Image (cartoon, coloured by chain):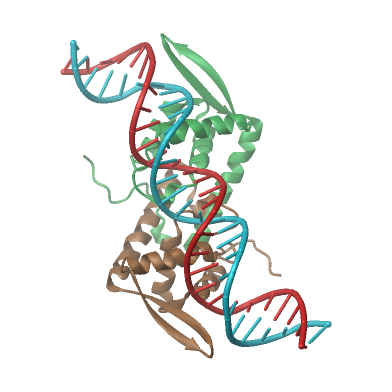
Chain colours: A brown, B green, C red, D cyan
Amino acid sequence: MMHSSELLKGTLQTILLKVLKDNGRMYGYELTQRVKDLSDARILLTEGALYPTLHKLEAEGMLKTEVVTIGKRVRKYYSLTAEGKSLVKERVAEFIEFINTMGNVLQIPQPAISGTPFPGEKKG
Amino acid sequence: MMHSSELLKGTLQTILLKVLKDNGRMYGYELTQRVKDLSDARILLTEGALYPTLHKLEAEGMLKTEVVTIGKRVRKYYSLTAEGKSLVKERVAEFIEFINTMGNVLQIPQPAISGTPFPGEKKG
DNA sequence: CTTATATACATAATTCACTTATGTATTAGC
DNA sequence: GCTAATACATAAGTGAATTATGTATATAAG
């Protein structure tokens, strides 16, 4: 899923489901780009993780697909099913509980969790 | 490391290092209890994950040990080396960056990350 | 035109942090 | 005397990821 950080493990399904919820129907490559943008290039999805995960979520009935041909290119659009929408809520709630728990264990002061996206970064 | 949540993966070293920093020298079993307390029983370290990780951190020079005999019981106390202290800072900073990044990707509103430990839970 | 890069999908082999299972031994509670 | 808690340790197995590979179209640069 990513070059660095062991921490991303276990977050892939949550990320894909939530980004699909927020953006409506999207195709695989588009998802990688959206996540790259949202994370300021900190999370770079690899195909080896992405496609098997999408296939799995589809097989489980969380996602439905629609194949669209653009010229000679084939795109497979994914969107949430009713079950999928329910799963997103669970997963995001679980993630929030996780960070609150970790915040207590690691004794992280509140100001450390900033409202500002990517503070202190430089352009260019 | 835990029954539920795939999310804990990759957090074990960070947890152990930070709890050792905050509590000084501790032994393995004590660490499992401290983490259980701090997490309101949400994070239950298993020995199969705990001991190999402690051994690895010791082998890497991040922890030093001291064996103490209490009656006929043997306790192995772990504490941070100078290198270990430096590693804690890195790891905690990395974790904070991780949750800020995830907060942006998942579009989690600030109030969701509460200053109150374990809101809404019930006793007993 | 040719080459490199970006777009777009897919799967197989491998890795590695974890879970599960197992083993040993002391101490405390009923 | 039995069970649970304390206290350490390691081996086998799992599964979500990485890495590697494959196919094919579109575009920009030389």
- Residue B58 occupies quadrant: top right
Q: Is residue A8 left or right of residue A61?
A: right
Is B15 drawn above or below residue B70 in the view shown? below
Q: Is residue B55 left or right of residue A85?
A: right
Give whichever of B78, B110 is nearer the camera.
B78
Report the quarter where the N terminus of chain B lies.
top left
Is D26 drawn above or below residue B40 in the view shown? below
Q: Point out residue A7 in the picture as x, y percentages from the top left corner.
A: 51, 51
**What is the residue that sits farthest to the bottom in this orientation?**
A71
Give whichever of A70, A123 is nearer the camera.
A70
How many callouts does the rendering have?
Answer: 0
Q: Point out residue D1 in the picture as x, y percentages from the top left corner.
A: 18, 10
Q: Point out residue B41 in the picture as x, y percentages from the top left corner.
A: 33, 39
Q: Is residue A10 left or right of residue C30?
A: right
Residue B115, can we see it?
no
- Residue A39 occupies quadrant: bottom right
| Residue drawn at (28%, 73%) of the image | A82
Report the quarter where the C terminus of chain B lies.
top left
Q: Point out residue A75 in the picture as x, y percentages from the top left corner.
A: 48, 81
